[in-house]
Amino acid sequence: MQGDFSRLTFDPAQRFSAVLSQQGRVQLDSEINEHAAILLHYMRTLAADLLGPVAFPAGPGRGTGGFCVDTFDGGNFTVTPGRAYVDGILCECDGTDYWSQPDGHFDPGRRERHQFPSGPFMIYLRVWERLVTAVEAPRIREVALGLHGPDTTVRTRVVWQLCWMELDTEALVPDMKTAQQFLRDEIGRRFRPRPLLSARVRNPESDSAPCDVPPRSGYRGPENQLYRVEVHRGGTAETATFKWSRENGSVTLPVKAVNGTSVELETLGRDVKLGLEIDDVVEIVDDASVSRAAVDAREEECPLLYTVTEIDHAKRTVVLDRDPTADPYQPDVGTVPARHPLLRRWDHGAAGREQSHDPSAGVNGEGAQHIREGVWLALEDGLEVRFEGDVERAPQYRRGDYWTIPVRVVTGNVEWPRGLNGRPQPKRPQGIDYHYAPLAVVLPQDSGGHTVVDLRVPFPLRRQ
């Protein structure tokens, strides 16, 4: 979640059941957010325990209920309105088809990639949550505080996407009882094992010559920060790249227009700290690019990052080092106002690199940094991270995987769990968490038609 948070503190292993305020105390965003996370975790866990990992409320009649694959004509299929619970997450559908689904955002230039196969295939749901700010949903902002006033809160939105997976014609086509495990196994083969990351602050004494006077050890930044390390290009360690932000990726500026390398913005930020400077690395995203990222999370193909070369404060425009519309992966990004385009700043550019300590930490040709496993990589101000994987199998880096790292000035240290030996413990990515639910299997017939086999698991509604 790329919000302006102080830290993310919810941990189910702590078994906390509530957050209770005390009189006369300072209120923190992390405590309010943890309370919401505790309640959400309770409700979703209860729903999954009672209903199972995937469940659909049964409707009155055959072929009804939420997300029923109603028709398939060889080029498109429809699903019925209703609800589904996927790992306890409520998904609601008003009725749609594959090409018109609300969070599909298929790229017209890559439409052939989504054409249905001639053999049998499974239709399933991919469910996840995205952060929505006042830029993507203007109704969040209270205009009484000013048209460009503070964005007091953000939202999380449940995203569900209709997907399909081609089935081996020689394999046993899964039925209702085996479909869920079959789907989990197939997805697991793509994205497991997950990568691990550790974080620490460097002790300069270990890097200094015997006669040198070492600088102050620990975190040397001037402010408390919530760093975000995020995978940019997916794949294995040989191809994967990452980017990082000291503001949890929350520095975003709404885009008004893109004209070649020039990008017009609605604002250049509230202040210098949350604005742009020359040589900053940025990306342009919108509703479509966020949704498409879930489809192509493991692929090595990824959008470009850009470097700011000029800033015109009077016209609120920035000039980038290349034309965003020339990006072969997403040539239309930022050009459709209805998709709420925005420019996001990352901090691994010239201002954030510690090249004197780690000459190989520079930005590569696509604007990101290469992942190297088993070594400590310097970010800035003494903060270091280390990627590693499973000892038996190389990890699969998925675009969008992220870790957040709180650092505090008063301790000069990073808030990160440590083992009995005092070393930082490797952690799996905090997100993005994807959940899956099988809907149907489509079987071609010799006559040229298709048979749709419903894989949904219904549960009865309580009658009043």
Image (cartoon, rainbow, N blue to C red):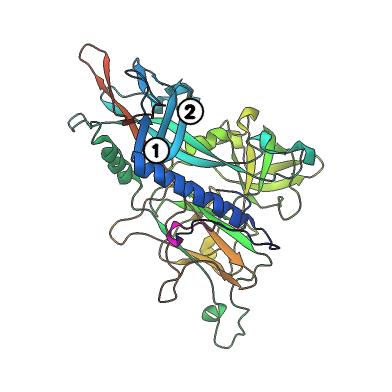
Determine which of the numbered discs, if any, sits on residue 106 in the image. 2
Asked if residue 349 can be seen in this view, the reply is: no
Predominant secondary structure, magenta span: loop
Task: Indicate whether 66 appears above or below 261.
Answer: above
Q: Is residue 296 above or below residue 204?
A: above
Residue bounds of the magenta highlight: 6-14
* Location of residue 238 (image quadrant): bottom left
**Amino acid at the residue labelled 1:** Val
Check contact, mark 1 vs mark 2: CB within 8 A: no
Q: Is residue 346 above or below residue 378?
A: above
Name the quadrant of the C terminus. top left
Residue 317 appears at what percent x and percent y? 74, 40
Q: Which residue is mark 1?
A: 86
- Report crowding for label 2: few under 14, some 14 to 19, many 20 or more residues within 10 A (C-alpha): some
Q: Position of residue 187 (x, y in %)?
A: 33, 42
Q: Residue 112 at x, y = what percent?
A: 41, 25
Work out how far the residue at label 1 is from the one at label 2, CA to CA, in angstroms. 23 Å
Residue 198, relative to residue 287: is it above or below? below
Q: Tell me if 375 is positioned left or right of 193 in this view.
A: right
